[in-house]
Amino acid sequence: MVDVAEILADVEAESTALDALVAQLPAEVWARDTPSAGWSIAHQIGHLAWTDSAVIAAATAANGDTATFDSLMQAVQSGTVTIDSAAAELAQLTPATLLEQWRDGRRRMAASLREVTEGAKLPWFGPPMSAASMATARIMETWAHGQDIVDALGATREPSERLRHIAHLAVRTRNFAFKVNNLAVPESEFRVELTGPAGEIWMWGPADASDRVAGSAEDFCLLATRRRHRDDLALTAEGSGADQWLDIVQAFAGPPGEGRRREGRRKDGRRREGRRKEGRAPSATSQGAAPSAAGPTSPTEPAEAEAAGPTI
């Protein structure tokens, strides 16, 4: 059985790492643009804080008190509240105030998920999710928006074992990625072998699968969260299905977004020229996907909703 407390510990570890990065920034740097069009560093943190508050409302609803989440759902469905407007409103706060709101919110969010009745589902803007799946999705989203901030600062960060949560979401949502791109879902499973930060191999799918994906876990997560173009990552695919999947893979619900431009050189220094075939779906690591694909009404099917989690 999945231990929600263990996942929440990783949520806090991921949040703490990002917190340490932004907490030392001068106030004026919080206004710096990130790769997500129209979003500053303050927007990114504001979005995380807003989503944490939505999770608290959903957890409360899962335990029977639906009033707050119902009100939030109505506001979103009517357009009174949007992902962009919520982030923009919080971005107007001073960095110190926004930081404290984010810290307080994530503490209350973790406590609310721990209190969800076993077996209960949290309502969401797509299909409902378990507390464990919601917690896992919070790691994914925190890491992805953290990447936007890292990129805006021209910084780097060391990959952690927490990447496995994100990779797992992406593997579980393979079928959703095909469906959201209006493509036929492959009938057979794929083999995925990713190299974790410590050199260990993380594996999913049957060992004898003909379609296979391999590479670093960090690269796979960058691709699955739409933070890099496929051609700039050292990932390999064997089989037409696996190759197609790497063009569309995503660990979040909603449309894939417009995509980041190709830089033209992989992390291993090799150029990737001539790989793409005419008619293949373009790779899209989200340039504006954080705000534009974050629409909370994104459709996921019930069987895949827990894996897809909240949109980013």
Image (cartoon, rainbow, N blue to C red):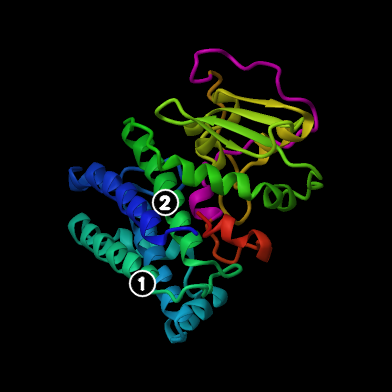
Residue at horizontal 53%, vertical 70%? 124
Question: Which is nearer the eye, 186 or 23?
Answer: 186
- Determine which quarter of the picture holds residue 303: bottom right
Residue at horizontal 30%, vertical 48%? 13
Stretch of the chain drawn in magenta: 266-293
Query: Is 183 included in the stretch rendered in magenta?
Result: no
Please give the residue where the numbered disc 1 appears in the rendered image. Answer: 112
Find residue 139 and name its label.
2
Find residue 140 and name its label.
none
Residue at horizontal 55%, vertical 61%? 295
Going by the numbered disc 1, the residue's amino acid type is: Ser
Residue at horizontal 56%, vertical 41%? 224
The location of residue 261, given as percent across then percent down, is 56, 31
The location of residue 34, given as percent across then percent down, is 39, 42
The location of residue 241, given as percent across then percent down, is 76, 35
- Helix, strand or loop under label 2: helix
Using residue 121 as the reference point, say whether residue 94 is left or right of it: left
Question: Which is nearer the eye, 200 or 217?
Answer: 200
Going by the numbered disc 2, the residue's amino acid type is: Ile
